[in-house]
Image: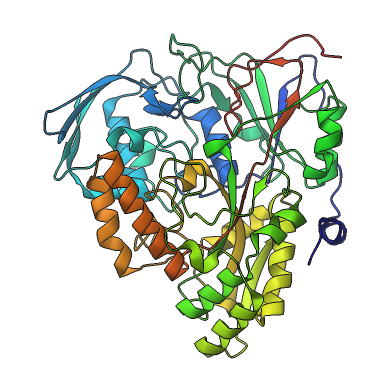
Amino acid sequence: MLTRRHGIAAAAGLIAAPTIALPQSRERAFRFVVNVGLQNLDPISSPSFVTRNFAYLVYDTLVSMDMQGRFKPQMLQGWEVSADKLTWNFRLRPGLAFHDGAAVTAEDVVASLKRWGNRDSIGRRLMAATAELVATGADAFTLRLARPYGGVIEAFGKPSVHVPFIMPARIANATPPTQQVREIIGSGPFVFLRDEWVPGERAFFRRNERYVARDEAADGLSGGKLAKVERVEMITMPDISMRALSLQQNEVDYLEYAPVDNLPRMRANRNIVISQASGQAEMMYAVSINHHQAPFNNVLVRRALQQCLDRGEILAATGFAEIGRPECAAMLMCGTTLSSTLGSEAIATPSLERARALLREAGYNNERVVLMHPTDSALLNPFGLVLIDRMKRAGFNVDVQASDWSSIAQRWVQRAPLDRGGWSVLPVVYTGFDMADPLSNMGIGFNCTDNQPWGYCEASMTPILERFEAESDPERRRALAAELNREAVAQATFPIAGQFRAPAAWRAELRGVIDFGFPVIWNIERGGRAG
């Protein structure tokens, strides 16, 4: 077994990064440290959390989720729906403006939703059920459905990758959803300072003076998004140990993920607060598989990989044993509304012996498997080490290609063959915000969409997904979700590897921090020192 100590030692040999010098100023900026470097600024083309975090500062959404998981109007004033639930009329609230001063119009909304709808799993399904999406006035638009769709508001309020952020129509219309937008113009509470951006290291923002917040109190992602700091710095620190030290020494204000080894010391420090977010805020390790090429276009080889994923060993090696759920074998995550373990018996007790037998049955002939290993990620580096160890022990011919996340993210979306920079597997991690809904779950909702790196397409899942998306009855949705769990496990579309809670940490003198599960920067202000 690869222990946490072994993982740390190996990581030390892989990472040799300089300390990032943090600039000082008279009025100190709010500094928050994200897990990996920011390279892609487009939340529609990029599937990365760091881009999502960036986008929540710059852009805004039509609908937002509160702390209880309820969906509330954000950019919208409200909506009306016909008795047959096929016609939805929406109206924007007054005062919305982009960072360049232009008013936000219904045309911008329609263009943004259509671009998102060509990229996102939920968006694509909603657009496929849509007969018409049109602006009916400067601040009004109508969605007419061709067939029932049970989650219109939930789709508009999707909280994580890919979020339906609103951007100017001139940008949305001119940019295919798989290409990065060239101009970052949102209507959110902060303005991105592109001239100061250092790709992969830091990004800078200033308060948006034009932003008109809602009157309600901030609640999760919903309510009034009041920017209470003038300047924000989004920082990457490749040296994971420096993140905890910088927070303890008051050089930064907030860590997206507190290093696990430092949690006991941080909990004992009255100047630091540790997140208590759970439920959908919990995370799931998984393996992104390239279904487009051998050997993982063979379901038996994919099932062999599933058997390599001993969740107990992975969570122990990554330091999450005490705040993890190694027993959880649910694709939709444990503790969520639609959670099911139907069909999960196959992965309840993973076995390397079974993995070897499956490789023999598949006729695996020592084909090279390129594993991209993100060594700068506090979450993915130790998981990657366990994955490498167990795949090799199972008999996979693993070609480990270690790099930083920013570089890997660029390769991940490519479909080149292995001898031209292609890839086979990648350790990843997603939150319950992404995994708990079958339509956004990475191993279910992207079935046959052909617009994401993993590229699975299982005919058996298609009719079940169609029934689920049209259904609005909670009990029937749960039954269909269970069927989808069974199919995703059987086809090994996106093997899961352990559920856990990865807490954020921040300085105790901060007031108004929203403990949601990922960085929410509005509503935060500085108070007096705790110590």
Residue 98: percent from the left, percent from the top? 43, 23
Question: Does residue 39 appear anywhere in the picture?
Answer: yes
Residue 95: percent from the left, percent from the top? 37, 13
Residue at 48% over, 62% down: 344
Q: Nearer the viewer, residue 468 or 237?
A: 468
Q: Is residue 298 above or below residue 253?
A: below
Q: Nearer the viewer, residue 374 or 422?
A: 374
Which image quadrant for residue 35?
A: top right
Q: Quadrant of the N terminus?
A: bottom right
Image check: 266 left or right of 278? right
Residue 250: percent from the left, percent from the top? 84, 24
Q: Nearer the viewer, residue 442 or 294?
A: 442
Image check: 18 left or right of 188? right
Residue at 83% over, 21% down: 270
Q: Is residue 459 above or below residue 417?
A: above
Q: Quadrant of the C terminus?
A: top right
Question: Does residue 22 appear anywhere in the picture?
Answer: no
